[in-house]
Image (spheres, helix red, strand yellow):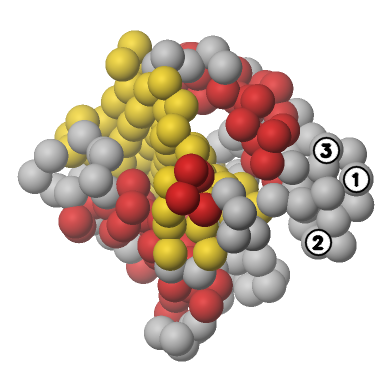
Amino acid sequence: MLEDTGERVIPENMKITNGLLMEHVARYHFAAEYVTGRVLDFASGSGYGAHIIAKSCKHKIDEVIGVDKDKEAVRYARGIYYHPLTTFREGDVTDPGLPGELGQFDVILSFETIEHITEEGQFLSNIYRMLKPGGILILSTPFGEGRGKPCGQPYHVHQLKVEEFKGLFSAYREADFYYQKGVLIQPAAAAEDKNFPLGIVVCKK
């Protein structure tokens, strides 16, 4: 049985009305509109998100690779979320050798990952290297008090301010920002005065 840390989403252990579950699932259904070709789910956790993409986008993708550093999570994902288009493998999102091992992708997804990572620059560099020219990155994070400041979440290094989050993606040709509250995801321009707790970016390399 995969350990529930309080942060990890394990749909089999949660009620369908669980707000955290609905919030996480909503991001993958949002991303499904963009995915095509070869897809990477970076920090894939228990594997439900990669499975959503494989099932809902099977006619427009070649494969989905889920990468997570937790050996038990990878084992769980392989057992519960098998799909012929999906591969789960162990790996650290900050490993500089990972781009050479995995190659490039048409779409990279990484939801609720960056707030856990000290080596933020290496993480973002890996993503950029693994994304094909013209490829799409979709990444999310909760907002908070800012880089280097305590956020009250034991598994988070920090939680970025909105302006810090928006400043991370200047290397991309396009970057469109969205805000999320529960299952509701809105363009930033429509939500900036409504105190949405989470941000999503859709970047084009």
Mark seen at residue 153: 2
How would you rate the neighbour count of disc 3 (Cα within 10 Å): few for under 14, some for 14-19, many for 20 or more? some
Q: Position of residue 174 (x, y in %)?
A: 42, 21
Q: Is 132 on the left or on the right of 178, as rendered?
A: left
Instruction: Using the image as rendered, state which of residue 168 and residue 77 is in the foreground.
Output: 168
Quarter of the view holding residue 204: top left
Instruction: Using the image as rendered, state which of residue 171 and residue 162 is in the foreground.
Output: 162
At x 54%, y 72%, the residue is 20
Q: Is residue 88 above or below residue 27?
A: above
Q: Is residue 7 above or below residue 64?
A: below
Could you tell me which secondary element the residue under label 2 belongs to? Answer: loop
Instruction: Using the image as rendered, state which of residue 28 and residue 91 is in the foreground.
Output: 28
At x 77%, y 52%, the residue is 144
Q: Is 117 on the left or on the right of 172, as rendered?
A: right
Identify the image quadrant of the C terminus: top left
At x 43%, y 64%, the residue is 184
Q: Which residue, given by chain and number where applicable, does mark 1 sit on?
A: 149
Q: What residue type is labelled 3?
A: Arg
Q: Is residue 166 above or below residue 68?
A: above
How would you rate the neighbour count of disc 2 (Cα within 10 Å): few for under 14, some for 14-19, many for 20 or more? few
- Whether residue 89 appears in this view of the structure is no
Q: Which residue, given by chain and number where applicable, does mark 3 sit on?
A: 147
Could you tell me which secondary element the residue under label 1 belongs to? Answer: loop
Q: How far apart are marks 3 and 2 (CA)?
A: 14 Å
Could you tell me which secondary element the residue under label 3 belongs to? Answer: loop
Q: Which amino acid does label 1 sit on?
A: Lys
Q: Is residue 62 above or below residue 180?
A: above
